[in-house]
Structures are given as structure tokens and as C-alpha cells.
Amino acid sequence: MLENPMRKNGKFYIGMVLNVLEGMLSGFNFFLLYEVMKMLWAGKVNFSFLLYSALSLAGIFVLRIIVYGIGYTESQIGGAAVSNRIRLFLGNKIKKIPLSRFTQGQTGQYINIITSDVNNYEKILTHTVGDLVKYIAFCLMMIVFVGYIWLPGGIILACVELVLIPFLWLSFRVVKKYGTEKNKVSAEAVSSIVEYITGIQTFRAYGVGGTKNKTVTSDLKKFSDVSYDYEKHGIPTNAIQCVFLWLGLPIMVIAASGPLLSGKLDPVSYLLICMLPMLLAKLSDSISRGLMSYKNLKISRDKIIDIINEPEEQGSMEPLQTATHEITFDRVDFSYVAEEPVLQHISFTVSDQKLTAIVGDSGSGKSTILNLISKYYEPTGGTISIGGKAINHVAAERVLEQISMVDQDVFLFDDTIRENIRHARPDATNAEIEAACKEANCDGFIRKMEKGYDTPTGENGNLLSGGERQRLSIARAILKNSPILLLDEATASLDIENELAVKEAISNLLKAKKTVVMIAHTLSIVKNADQILVVSGGRIAEAGTHYELLSQNGKYAAMWKAEQKLSVSRL
Ligand SMILES: Nc1ncnc2c1ncn2[C@@H]1O[C@H](COP(=O)(O)OP(=O)(O)OP(=O)(O)O)[C@@H](O)[C@H]1O
């Protein structure tokens, strides 16, 4: 069983014990001061007594500093170690969460939890809990001290402290309602900011930056509104609680006056026990705020626990070893959103080491087929097999080991070109990387760059053109050399030079004997495919070779004629 990442460590508990000790030492000062004041009042003070008292106070002070220093350091180190373990755990966990969970809204949640909520939880461990136990210990010492001087006084102070309970209960309700809402709205705001920043180029290009900016502004406004509501509903409870805590002072003045007048209490004791409720009220206020922020930060803790408990991708981690790599869809159904089927009862076979092309209207479900083969999503019905083995019980990681994917969205890390390609096969040598790049038609443009293969690609490859990025992704596929190749051909949006370079790279890629599934956006490229699947409305409308489909005179033939007409009219 995996270790619980939220588990606190020894350093954290040592830090807590030392915090309690520091609180008690602070309270101990009063016992000493009390003795000094009594001696002063009795006129028995002499130099050696004052020196002894001053040294004792200084000793307690030094001890407090030492305890504070060690306690602070231990709880900081202990708390930071726990949050570090949580961060590593979450980083690992994210890898195992099914990809279908990464919708845009969910992505904001994950970012919020991994960054802000983990920081908040770290704050609980390193500051909030430590301060709380220290204040509580100090507070208890003061009550004990007053009780030591005059027992009924101690009981009065303890009763005043009990007043905190109903107010804390009310405050916790506010925190639960508005704190949870605040956390949710914050995640939504993060989602829209992420979308705004990642899409900034597109927004600017289409002049919709202002509109999108309005969405972000509105989400941020929602956040500030809920923060305002949170404060607004918390203030009355806090204010009334404060009044009750301060009532300890007049109650004590009146209650202790009887014993003072009857001589049961001396004036020094009377003065001290009348002054301490003021300090206790301030301290109780800090405890109440500390408890509220603890409760608030616990929302972050619960969010982290939610991710820890998220179901992980299921499936065997046994390597997927099959003699052949034909891919079979047997009555496969799929929908991204319940009740909105995208693929319906699809059945087909992609033969081993043959090229199958998928064509069809936009939105007909072509990319979805590739997503299911890669196990980015699980079918809602039917079976997908590779080499005769059903993959529904095989871990996505194991299936993806057999697949290279070249699609329209090439993701590049903010690293050098060489390292970006090496991700396809981490143990590849530099010579192998360069050979793959030659095949993928990118060696030429890479060598022309100032630092060649060591040139940084910029964040998400934004220093490269679309065609260059596509060729790098083809180089990755060549380097990975896996038995299955999934290809989303998209050369239409490229300039003529890049289009030719990418097409040549693709034909080099197809030279090796592999099971290839290629989405084709132009039909001329699939004329020689071993099989063409025509997808329409989430079903396979037609299947066959180019000539078989032309002779059927159906959808494919119509698409072919339309494309031919278009290319003639362009001439
Ligand atoms: N992540 C998603 N969530 C919800 N619906 C989706 C998602 N991805 C795709 N769809 C929907 O599923 C349907 C099929 O999409 P798919 O991307 O498979 O089509 P396609 O044939 O590849 O289109 P294109 O040729 O334009 O890329 C479309 O209606 C699309 O809106």
C-alpha cells in the first residue's frame, strides 16, 4: 500500500511540543513578576532579590528564544517536508489520472490544488498549528495563574473562554459555506486565466482579446465578490465575540472587589487579576482567528485529499506483447458527454503492417478513433484489440509504448531541439537523433540555426514554424520506431515549401513496415492506402481501397470528385 503523503513527520511533532513549551514559558513570566510585585508592595526588596529576579526573567527569555528557534525550525522543516512529499505524490498521481478527466475546468482545479492549496496546507503545518498550540498553552497558563492567586478568578476566566465555543461554531459555518465557494470560484478563475494566457495569440489575432478579457475579469470579480461575502458574514460574529471576551474585565473587577475589601485579596493580586482579562481577550481573539484560518485552510487539505483519492487508470502493467499489431474495433461505442454518442457500433480491422486511412467530414469522429486506440479515452461499449488482445484491461502506458503519434497539435517542451526529440526514446544517442531528423526532413533547418541541435525551441515550440514543429514530431516518431503509427495528416494549413517537406517526411516515415492509421484531410495522399475508412456521423459509411470506393460511387467518390474539381479550379 502507498504511503499516505499527508502523514506528519517527527520534526513536525517536535516543533509542536516546543511551541507548547514556549507558550508555557511565556505564562511562567507572570508567576515570577507576581512574586516581585508582592515583595515591592511589602517593601522587602533588596538588590540581591532584584538581581535574582532580573536574571531569572532573562534566563526564561533566553530559554524561550532557544525553544522558539528550535521549535520554529523544526516545524518549518517538518511542515515543508510534508508539503514536499505531497507535491511529489500529486505530480505522480496526475500521471495516473485518466486523461478524460483533464477537461478545461478540471485543469484549473488541478492547478489550483497543486499550487495554491498545497501552499495553504504548508501554511497550516508550518505556521497556523504551531501558533495555535502556543497561544492555547499561554492562555491556559494565564488561567492557571489567576486560579493560583484566586481560584474563583480562574474559574471566571475559564467560563469567559467557553463563550468562544458557540461563536466559533457560527464562524466555522461561515468558513464552510463561503470558504468552499471561494475555493471553487478561485479554481474557475485559474481556468479562465490559463485559457486566456494559452490562447492569447489567437485572441489577439482575431481581435477577441477584449471579450475574453471580460470573461477573466468577470471570473475575478466573482472571486472578489465571494471574498467580500465571506468577510461580510464573518464580521458580525467576530465583533460580538470580541465584546463577550472583553466582558471578562468588568466581571473580574466587580467579582474580585468583595475579597479585596474583606482583605482576602491583597492589592497586588487584585491589580494583576484585573489586568489579565485584557491580555486574555487579545489572546483569545488571536486563537479564534487562528482556528478560523485553520478551518479555512482545511478546505485546501480536503481538496488535496480529493485528488489523492481520485480513481486511477486501471489496467495491467504487464508489457503488451503480441505477435502482430493489427487493430480491431468490435462494435465500439463512445461519447464524450453522456447521451451524445460520437461513435456508434463501429467495427473494422486495421491489418498488421498495412496503411489504413480514415477520411470523412469534419466532426465525424476521426480523431476520436485515434484517441481510443491510444487509450486517451475508454470506449463506452464494444472492444478494441491490438494483435488479438483486448486492450481494455491493459494500462494506457503499456499500450502507448506500442504507438507513435504524429498529430496536428505538436507539443514541445521549453528545451533544446535535441532534448525535445529525445523524449521519444530517452536512451537514444545523438547520432540516432540526428539520423531520425534527416529522415524527417528537419536536419537541414536545424543545422542552419545558430546553435544547431542545441537551439532552444521556446515555450511550446513558439520559436519554430508550424511545418518545422510537425517535422520534429515526425522525427520523434521515427526515433521511437514503435510498431503502430497513428498519424493525423494536416498539411493543408502549411505553405507550399513546408507542405512538400512534411509530405516527404511522412513518406519516409511510412517506408518502415508498420501498422499505420492515418487521418487524411486531402484524398490525394491516401490513394495508395491499403484500406480507406470513410467515417460519417460516427459510423463507418464505406470501407475499401481507393478504386473499390470510386466504383461504389458513394460518399468517397463524391469527396474525390469535389477535391479534383477544386484542384483543377485552383490551376
Ligand atoms: N473532448 C471533447 N469533449 C466533448 N466533445 C468532443 C471532444 N472532442 C471532440 N468532441 C466532439 O466529438 C465529435 C467528433 O470529434 P472528432 O475530433 O473526433 O472529429 P474529427 O472527425 O476528427 O474532426 P476534424 O476533422 O475536424 O478534426 C465532434 O462533434 C466534436 O465536437
Image: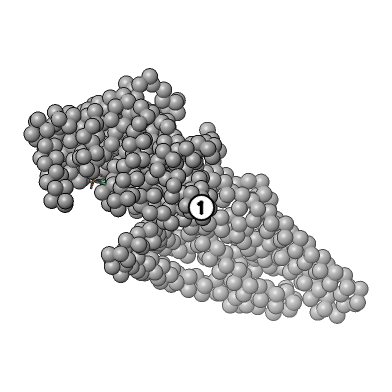
Badge 1 residue CB within 8 Å of ligand 1:
no
Is 315 located above or below residue 360 in the figure?
A: above
Is 251 located above or below residue 433 in the figure?
A: below
Q: Is residue 258 visible?
A: no
The residue shown at (28%, 36%) is 518
Is 108 located above or below residue 212 in the figure?
A: above
What percent of the width, then of the height, locates residue 43?
86, 80
The residue type indicated by label 1 comes to Thr
Which residue occupies the foreground of this view, 458 or 561?
A: 561
What percent of the width, then of the height, locates residue 444?
44, 47
Image region (quadrant) for ligand 1: top left
Residue 46 picture quarter: bottom right
The residue shown at (41%, 22%) is 321
Residue 565 is left or right of residue 125, and the answer is: left
The residue shown at (46%, 49%) is 446
Q: Is residue 483 visible?
A: yes
Q: Residue furthest front?
A: 571
Q: Please, which colouring scheme is shown?
A: one colour
What percent of the width, then of the height, locates residue 350?
27, 27
